[in-house]
Each structure stands twice: as structure tokens, then as C-alpha cells.
Amino acid sequence: LESIRLREGKFDVIISDFSMPEMSGFEFASMVHKLDHTIPIAIITGYGEDLLDKDRDECDMVLAKPIQLSELESALRKLLAVRRPVST
């Protein structure tokens, strides 16, 4: 979050795990989008179908573990295609 806040780099896509020590992946996605709404975000989880069906307005995609390289490649292509325009 600090890198996004300081705008140290341009992020085309963010892929994050759902379970993190400080917050959930959905909370992280919400915080990222408050800083930069243009970044597409995918959350990866090992919690299964329950989380995949959950309300997830803050992220663009939820992927189930284990994930195959081909699935990750497909997800990245889709995420890059949904990149939101910058507000002027």
C-alpha cells in the first residue's frame, strides 16, 4: 500500500492472497482502490468455493488455489483487459 500511496511505481495489475496477517485480501483491494481505482486486482485463496461466491465488489477476480500457470496467464490477460481509465 505504501508504494501505491507514494506512487513509486506504476502497477498494471495486483494479485494478492486472501489471507494476510493485517487484513483480508478484500480489505486490501478496497484500500488500493481508494488510492488508485484504475488498478485491476485479483485475490487468490485456498478457502474454496465459499469465498469465490462471496460479494467481492472491491476486486476484479477471485482465483482458487492451487492455481495452474495457464490459469494465472489467462487471469492476467483478463485483468489487463479490464484496466479502468484514469479520471481527469
Image: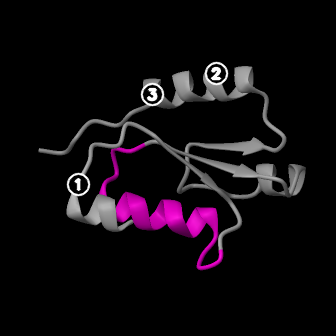
In this view, the residue farthest toward the bottom is 22
Q: Which residue is mark 1?
A: 8
Residue 50, above or below 2: above
Q: Which residue is mark 2?
A: 74
Q: Amino acid at mark 1?
A: Glu
Query: What is the x, y in percent for residue 60?
Result: 56, 43
Query: What is the x, y in percent for residue 72?
Result: 67, 29
Q: How is the image coloured?
A: one colour
Distance of label 1 from label 3 (alpha carbons) = 20 Å
Sequence-first disc among 1 and 3 = 1
User: Left or right: 86 with respect to 52?
Assistant: left
Please tell me whether mark 2 or mark 1 is closer to you in this view.
Answer: 1
Distance of label 3 from label 2 (alpha carbons) = 10 Å
> Element type at marker 3?
helix
Residue displayed at 55% across by 69% down: 27
Q: Amino acid at mark 3?
A: Leu
Which of the image's four quarters has the N terminus? bottom left
User: Left or right: 48 with respect to 43?
Assistant: right
What segment carries the magenta color? Answer: 21-39
